Amino acid sequence: MDDSKCPVDPQTRQKWLDAAKAKGDQPPHPPKPAPPPASLPAHAPTALHLHRAENDPKMLEELTPQILRLPQEQRNILLQQWQDLRAISELHNIGRTRFSLDTLRWAPASPIPSQRAPPPPTTRPLATNREVSSIPRATSTSQTLNSAERAALPANSEQDTGHDRDTGNWIYPSQSQFFAAMQRKGHKPEAADMQTIVPIHNAVNERTWREVLRWEEGRGGASTQTQGGDQEGPRLVSFAGDSKALTPRARWNGLWGWKRPFDRHDWVVERSGGERVEYVIDFYEGRGADGKVGGGPLNFYLDVRPKLNSWEGVKTRLGRAVGL
């Protein structure tokens, strides 16, 4: 699916995170390290000891218990001093260095640009693998789409992989793509949240597609795959999300006390005969076991229906109303 247009809206993302936290699925954020003290105690090993022990296993064995007895903050200082010493030792071919008894650090005798090695990454890189959806993708070109459909076509931050070669289905964005798309939109996402947000995003789209298939049953044929990899039956042409645009039904429901939907999607579906039907989806918070809306375990209500902007959409709505 599209990693830049699919639900990366901050309001939608917060709804998902709140529900996941209530269910206990939200992973904890790594704690921020406390600032280290200014210096090491006099009896502690120095960076010079560690530097010498690199090539002396016996000395390293003697230093290890002393280092482990140090508090974590002091071990961090010792590690930083040792990294500084290793970086400075590489400057011997550039200029002279000296060891300061005041700071217990090696420093260049004359001004030399810093060449300290970059610190190790503090977080794991985000996953780049992508999940293949169960939603067949219509492979129509932009020349065959109307203006609304072209506007809803995806624009991935990485190269658009189109449909999966084996199944012909849409491919969901990876955690890395999802994170990058949110950053481009000016949001401030947490990398640790991606392992919660992306699976919810995928599950919501799968559930939406099942609701679309219920409407399309008997009208576009069953969604099956031919030997050539082509999909027969309903296929998704394009999609777009706009949480700020209320549908007429959402406005009407609001007059009767319904809570406003937290997101809205517009999907274009192509039937096996080539007819296209536009669908609109309102996303509501579901009720928990206590009967209250929101704040409980992951629970959403999807109001999926064809739009009434075409004869096909009108016929489909009327057909369900009379039981056809």
Image (tube, rainbow, N blue to C red):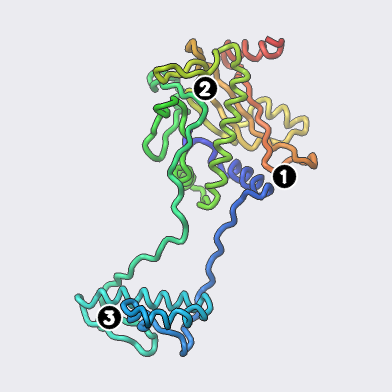
* Residue hosting label 3: 108
* Residue at far right of view: 290
Q: Mark 2 or mark 3, which is nearer the start of the sequence?
A: 3
Query: Mark 2 and mark 1: span between their CA atoms?
Result: 32 Å
Residue at point 59% right, 53% down? Answer: 27
**Which callout, 1 or 3, points to the residue nearer the camera?**
1
Q: Is residue 96 left or right of residue 39?
A: left
- Which structural element holds mark 3? strand
Q: Secondary structure at mark 2?
A: strand
- Please give the name of the residue rendered at 37% of the width and 77% of the height, measured from the top-left corner: 82
Query: Is residue 227 left or right of 13 when viewed as pictured?
Result: left
Name the amino acid, label 3.
Pro
The picture places residue 24, in percent across and down from the top left corner, at 66, 50
Instruction: Work out how far the residue at label 1 is from the one at label 3, CA to CA, in angstroms.
Output: 60 Å
SS of the residue under disc 1 = loop
Pointer 1 residue = 296
